Image (cartoon, helix red, strand yellow):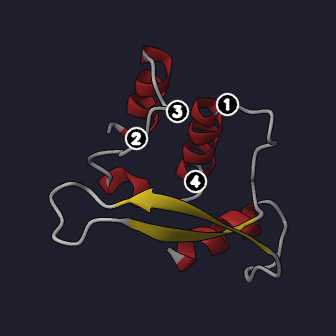
Amino acid sequence: MGKLVEAGREKVGRNKQTTIIVVDSKSAQNADATEEKGFFKLHIGVDVLGLPSANVTDRNGAIEMVSNYKNVTSNLDFVLKVLVDSGYTGDKFSDAIKDLIGA
C-alpha cells in the first residue's frame, strides 16, 4: 500500500512521504457470529491526498477515490469484492465500481 500512496502523491507533484494525515474513529458492533459481543473502536488514518469535500456523497466519494488510485497503480486489478455499508447503494455506484475495477 505504501507504493500506491507514494505513486499517487508523486503524480500530483507532492513529496513521496506524507506530512499530514486525517484520523477518525468509529464505533462498530461485533457481528452476531463472534463469541464476544459488544462494540469495538475502528481507527482510520488517511493521507489528505485526494480527499473529497464533505459535501460529496459517500457513493461519489468512493467512486472518485477508486478512480484516483486506479490512475496511479495496477494494484486494484486484483480486487474481487468491495464491501460497503448502506451509504453506497444504487446501480450508478455499483456500475461505476465495476467499470473501474471489475469488482
Identify the mark at residue 57; answer none if there is no mark. Answer: 1
Residue that appears at 74% across and 33% down: 56
CA separation in Å, label 1 and label 3? 8 Å
Q: Which amino acid lies under the numbered mark 1 shown in the image of this protein?
A: Thr
Q: Is residue 45 above or below residue 73?
A: below
Q: Which amino acid lies under the numbered mark 4 shown in the image of this protein?
A: Tyr
Label 2 SS: helix
What residue is shown with label 3?
87
**Could you say which is closer to the camera, residue 82 or residue 96?**
82
Q: Quadrant of the C terminus?
A: top left
Q: Is residue 17 above or below residue 84?
A: below
What residue is shown with label 4?
69
Few, some or many C-alpha atoms within 10 Å of disc 4 (few <14, some 14-19, many ≥20)?
some
Few, some or many C-alpha atoms within 10 Å of disc 2 (few <14, some 14-19, many ≥20)?
some
Q: Position of residue 83 (x, y in %)?
A: 36, 46
What residue is shown with label 2?
101
Q: Is residue 86 left or right of residue 80?
A: right
Q: Is residue 20 above or below residue 24?
A: below
Label 4 or label 2, whichever comes before in sequence order? 4
Label 1 or label 3, whichever comes before in sequence order? 1
Residue that appears at 76% across and 44% down: 52
CA separation in Å, label 1 and label 2? 20 Å
CA separation in Å, label 4 and label 2? 10 Å
Q: Is residue 13 above or below residue 83?
A: below
The answer to whether mark 1 and mark 3 are in CB contact below 8 A is yes
Q: Position of residue 26 (x, y in %)?
A: 57, 61
